Amino acid sequence: MNITREKKIERVEELRQKFEEFPTFYLLDFNKLTVAQASDLRRRLKERNFSFQVIKNRLALRALKSDYFDHLKDYFRGPTAVAFAADDPVGLAKILKEYAKETKLLRFKAGILEGLYLEADRFEEIANLGSREELLAKLGYLMAYPLIKFYQTWQAPLVTFGQLLSQLKSKK
């Protein structure tokens, strides 16, 4: 089915808006993914407010920002899908990695992570990171740890002195 020129222009504009709106997106090869599997993946992603679209390579190349074009133009060959994330790129990467492991059909090509180019071999590192909440908890712990240790060190002579007094009292 051929689409009209107006539809193509409209589709390019939609893609351009998506590429600008979402700071993170991953390009995927979905070569042998069935319709049912693609629908299942879309459902999983939609539960977490991510989106997944199969795109035409030529239209996507027209819609890409010039900043990304040089890095990504070679990856728009063969069947290409784009997964978009507004605020949790690690969560999206985890879902895609899990689904790729289950079906053995998805393959990460490249992507843009918070505005920075991401090669295929780095995708695994992103997917293995902790969630945003886990990373914030670790950061909070690391920031509080020196203060906790300082407090314990400051309090140690008083505790030791109290223990000595208690031992003297029990001996007498």
Image: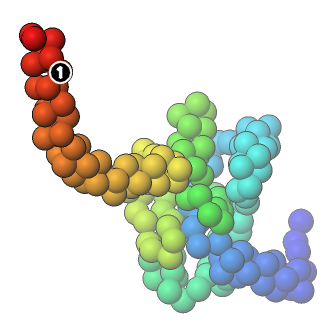
Coloration of the structure image: rainbow
* Towards the viewer: 32 or 36: 36
Q: Mark 1 — residue?
A: 166
Number of numbered tags placed on the structure image: 1
Q: Is residue 120 above or below residue 64?
A: above
Q: Is residue 94 left or right of residue 13?
A: left
Q: Is residue 157 above or below residue 48?
A: above
Q: Secondary structure at mark 1?
A: helix
* Towards the viewer: 147 or 95: 147
* Towards the viewer: 135 or 96: 135
Residue lying furthest front: 172
For the point 55% across and 58% down, the residue is 89
Residue 13 position in % (x across, y down): 78, 84
Q: Is residue 68 left or right of residue 162?
A: right
Residue 115 position in % (x across, y down): 50, 76
For the point 57% across and 67% down, the residue is 24
**From where the camera sits, is residue 67 visible?**
yes
Residue lying furthest top: 171
Q: Amino acid at mark 1?
A: Ser
Q: Is residue 119 left or right of residue 80?
A: left
Q: Is residue 106 above or below residue 115?
A: above
Residue 172 position in % (x across, y down): 10, 11
- Image quadrant occupied by the N terminus: bottom right
**From where the camera sits, is residue 126 visible?**
no
Estimate how packed mark 1 is, as few (under 14), some (14 to 19) or many (20 or more) residues with alpha carbons within 10 Å: few
Residue 30 position in % (x across, y down): 62, 49
For the point 73% across and 42% down, the residue is 44
Residue 83, image quadrant = bottom right
* Towards the viewer: 6 or 68: 68
